[in-house]
């Protein structure tokens, strides 16, 4: 069918508008920054004064928001008028369990749940995590093999539940999503759901508040495959554990597949109900170890290809020799390289690699948790920790909450979403708002800056 002129105009308009924006942006940035962060963006559509653009992943959005927010705001208003807004559509990320669209007055940037989620039901699986890009190594051999077997005949192997444990950044989340994705590829009618246990807890609390616990429980009991990430977050949450116990039993008896991940083996999950611990050991318990040198190289090669950057073997080997503890750090190194190269307008050469690896290697390898930060901040402000997580709007509570959110953002690797969840299930935009507020205060108020510095030192001192 021939397109008429109106169709063509509608199709071309976002491109034309984005091209205009790019011209302004290009004039204001070094070429490498522009090439790295703005060229990969695709304009999708325009409705009213909002231009929807597609970015490759969440990291892009966070990076752009953090570094180029002012320029982008200015540009979009210049091109589309004072109501001009941008909405990011994340191409790959579908792990978000809820829609995060929120229009904030202070920022014209809106994040929208991805449009191209092909799953038929809401599995919350991240389509990016697949077996195809999960590099096989001695470190993950058994866990991976069990995962493949389960994907062939979910619920029918003796690996039920499959319990995978290991340290941070070793591939647990990737693997369990890969299993879910493979199952859905093979059995599109199966009901698969994948979520982390802290989100499960937040939803359960909401169900209690809304008097819908039965629906909540029946919903999970109706699954064919239940995948729960980071089960250790159930520790200390008695009521959630009770409910999970019943869901577990119902599914297991019905021959439905359960897959769990954790940072520790079941027997070390102190504070978890004994009857859950014993059930977790019914199937197969297996670990993922840190990868060896060859596996690290293979993973790096795979990531380099995904990011579309070119690094020679000398560089890849250098990184693999020096960053050994976990895969997230390997990935972090590549991202840092891209970022450093773009910020300083230089190529990724060996000098830059050495500098970046050194920064990572000498950086303190400590894991500070959001809960720990919250505890120290609350002690400092003499505020009850629970109040910070509730909807309390007292001034001192708000300040403590915002400071804790801000410090969580800069001192942990947690996403905005995760941080929001730790503060009573607040939206990611609330976290951005807190971050902006604290940053402004730090700039304008020297006493406040010192206060935040003091708290930060306290946190750092306490974890050494
Ligand atoms: P964990 O859940 O154990 O903390 P993740 O699954 O989040 O770790 O993995 C951290 C990062 O490393 C992810 O981006 C993931 O894609 C990547 N990764 C982990 N293991 C592998 C692997 N075997 N092959 C390729 N990428 C991996
Ligand atoms: Mg994980």
Image: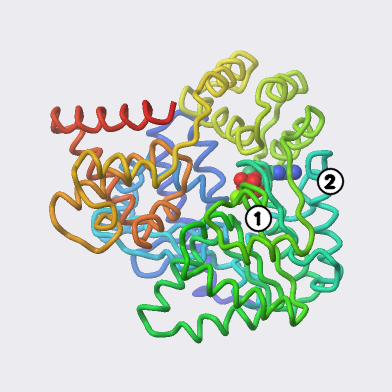
Q: Nearer the viewer, residue 28 or 118?
A: 118
Q: Which mark is residue 261?
A: 1
Q: Image quadrant of residue 448?
A: top left
Q: Nearer the viewer, residue 11 or 330?
A: 330
User: What residue do we see at 20% from left, 61% from top?
Assistant: 392
User: What residue do we see at 86% from left, 62% from top?
Assistant: 149
Alpha carbons under labels 2 and 1: distance apart: 16 Å
Q: Is mark 1 within 8 Å of ligand 2?
A: yes
Residue 50, placed above or below residue 432: below
Residue denoted by label 2: 141
Query: Is 241 on the left or on the right of 314, as rendered?
Result: left
Q: Are marks 2 and 1 in contact (CB under 8 Å)?
A: no
Callout 1: few (<14), some (14-19), or many (20+) C-alpha neighbours within 10 Å? many
Image location of residue 369, percent across then percent down: 44, 42
Residue 430, placed above or below residue 364: below
In the rendered image, the residue lying farthest to the top is: 351
Q: Nearer the viewer, residue 49 or 133?
A: 133
Query: Is 297 on the left or on the right of 20, as rendered?
Result: right
Residue 370, placed above or below residue 211: above
Q: Quadrant of the N terminus?
A: bottom right
Among the two numbered marks 2 and 1 on one chain, the one whose residue lies closer to the N terminus: 2
Query: Is 445 on the left or on the right of 32, as rendered?
Result: left
Q: Image quadrant of residue 131?
A: bottom right
Q: Quadrant of ligand 1?
A: top right
Q: Quadrant of the C terminus?
A: top left
Q: Image quadrant of residue 273?
A: bottom right
Q: Is mark 2 within 8 Å of ligand 1?
A: no
Q: Nearer the viewer, residue 112 or 355?
A: 355
Image location of residue 29, percent across then percent down: 41, 32
User: What residue do we see at 13% from left, 32% from top?
Assistant: 445
Callout 2: few (<14), some (14-19), or many (20+) C-alpha neighbours within 10 Å? some
Image location of residue 49, percent across then percent down: 34, 64
């Amino acid at each position: 069918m021939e397109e008429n002129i109106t169709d063509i105009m509608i199709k071309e308009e976002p491109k034309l508008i984005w091209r205009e924006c790019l011209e302004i942006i290009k004039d204001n940035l070094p070429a490498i920054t522009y090439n790295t962060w703005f060229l990969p963006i695709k304009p999708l559509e325009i409705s009213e004064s909002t231009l929807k653009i597609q970015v490759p992943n969440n990291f892009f959005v966070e990076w752009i928001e953090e570094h180029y927010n002012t320029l982008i705001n200015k540009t979009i208003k210049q091109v589309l008028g004072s109501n001009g807004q941008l909405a990011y559509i994340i191409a790959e990320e579908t792990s978000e369990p809820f829609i995060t669209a929120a229009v904030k007055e202070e920022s014209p940037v809106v994040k929208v749940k991805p449009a191209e989620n092909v799953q038929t039901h809401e599995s919350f699986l991240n389509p990016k995590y697949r077996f195809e890009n999960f590099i096989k190594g001695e470190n993950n051999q058994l866990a991976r093999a069990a995962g493949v077997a389960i994907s062939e005949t979910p619920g029918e192997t003796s690996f039920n539940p499959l319990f995978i444990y290991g340290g941070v950044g070793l591939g647990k989340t990737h693997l369990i999503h890969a299993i879910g994705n493979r199952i859905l590829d093979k059995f599109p009618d199966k009901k698969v759901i994948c979520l982390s246990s802290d989100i499960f807890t937040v939803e359960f609390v909401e169900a209690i508040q809304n008097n819908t616990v039965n629906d909540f429980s029946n919903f999970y009991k109706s699954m064919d495959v239940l995948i729960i990430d980071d089960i250790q977050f159930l520790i200390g949450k008695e009521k959630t554990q009770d409910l999970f116990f019943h869901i577990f039993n119902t599914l297991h008896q019905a021959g439905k597949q359960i897959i769990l991940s954790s940072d520790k083996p079941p027997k070390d999950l102190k504070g978890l109900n004994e009857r859950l611990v014993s059930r977790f050991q019914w199937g197969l318990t297996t670990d993922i170890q840190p990868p060896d040198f060859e596996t690290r190289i293979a993973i790096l090669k795979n990531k380099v290809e995904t990011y579309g950057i070119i690094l020679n073997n000398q560089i890849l080997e250098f990184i693999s020799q020096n960053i050994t503890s976990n895969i997230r750090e390997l990935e972090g190194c590549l991202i840092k390289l891209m970022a450093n190269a773009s910020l300083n307008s230089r190529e990724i050469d060996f000098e830059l690699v050495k500098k970046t690896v050194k920064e990572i290697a000498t950086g303190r390898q400590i894991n500070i948790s959001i809960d720990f930060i919250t505890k120290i901040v609350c002690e400092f402000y003499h505020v009850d920790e629970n109040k910070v997580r509730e909807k309390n709007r007292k001034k001192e509570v708000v300040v403590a909450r915002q400071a804790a959110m801000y410090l969580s953002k800069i001192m942990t690797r947690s996403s905005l979403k995760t941080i929001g969840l730790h503060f009573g299930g607040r939206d990611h935009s609330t976290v951005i708002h807190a971050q902006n507020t604290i940053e402004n205060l730090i700039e304008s108020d020297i006493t406040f800056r010192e206060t935040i510095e003091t708290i930060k030192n306290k946190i750092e001192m306490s974890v050494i």
